[in-house]
Amino acid sequence: MTEYEFTVHFSAEEYLQYYEGVAKAIQVQSKCGKIIQFPADKMREFVLSDGVHGSFIIRLDNKNKFLSIKRLNHGE
């Protein structure tokens, strides 16, 4: 298993394209510099009225398949 930490700041309007399925994947850069792409629907549980903000940990299996995602904090 591999873990990557990353931070995102999507306004509600920005995330709407992911929520509606217009955009299918989110691409982020981890704190160690690795570019990670994963299905946008994995962030739905973190959407608030102001969008999605904060630091997260994504866990991938040994074949880089999604396992889980967890919010570390809500970014200000």
Image: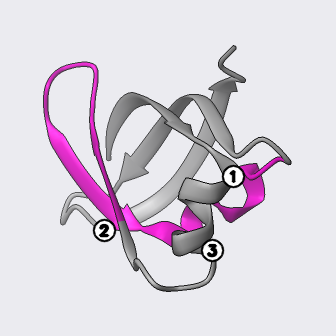
Circles 1 and 3 in contact, beta carbons < 8 Å: no
Q: Residues within 10 Å of mark 2 (few under 14, many from 20)?
A: few
Between the residue at mark 1 and the residue at mark 3, the CA separation in whole angstroms equals 10 Å
Q: Where residue 34 sits in the image (x, y, percent)? A: 14, 35
Circles 3 and 2 in contact, beta carbons < 8 Å: no
Nearest to the observer: residue 65 or residue 54:
54
Q: Amino acid at mark 3?
A: Tyr
Q: Earlier in the sequence, mark 2 or mark 1?
A: 1
Left or right: 71 as drawn, with respect to 14? right
> Which residues are drawn in magenta?
26-48
Q: Earlier in the sequence, mark 1 or mark 3?
A: 1
* Residue 3 falls inside the magenta stretch: no
Write down the quadrant of residue 53 in the picture.
Answer: top right
Left or right: 41 as drawn, with respect to 59? right
The residue singled out by tag 3 in the image is 19
Q: Amino acid at mark 1?
A: Ala
Please say if 67 is above or below 32: below
Q: Earlier in the sequence, mark 3 or mark 2?
A: 3
Q: Residue at x 39, y 29 (%)?
A: 6
Q: Residues within 10 Å of mark 1 (few under 14, many from 20)?
A: some
Q: Nearer the viewer, mark 2 or mark 1?
A: 1
Q: Where residue 26 sits in the image (x, y, percent)? A: 37, 60
Q: Amino acid at mark 2?
A: Lys
User: Helix, strand or loop at disc 1?
Assistant: helix
Q: Which part of the image, by quadrant, shows the C terminus?
A: top right
The residue singled out by tag 1 in the image is 12
**Residue at the extreme left of the image, as rendered:** 34
The residue singled out by tag 2 in the image is 65
User: Helix, strand or loop at disc 2?
Assistant: loop
> Which numbered dot is residue 42?
none
Q: Where residue 58 sits in the image (x, y, percent)? A: 44, 44
User: Helix, strand or loop at disc 3?
Assistant: helix
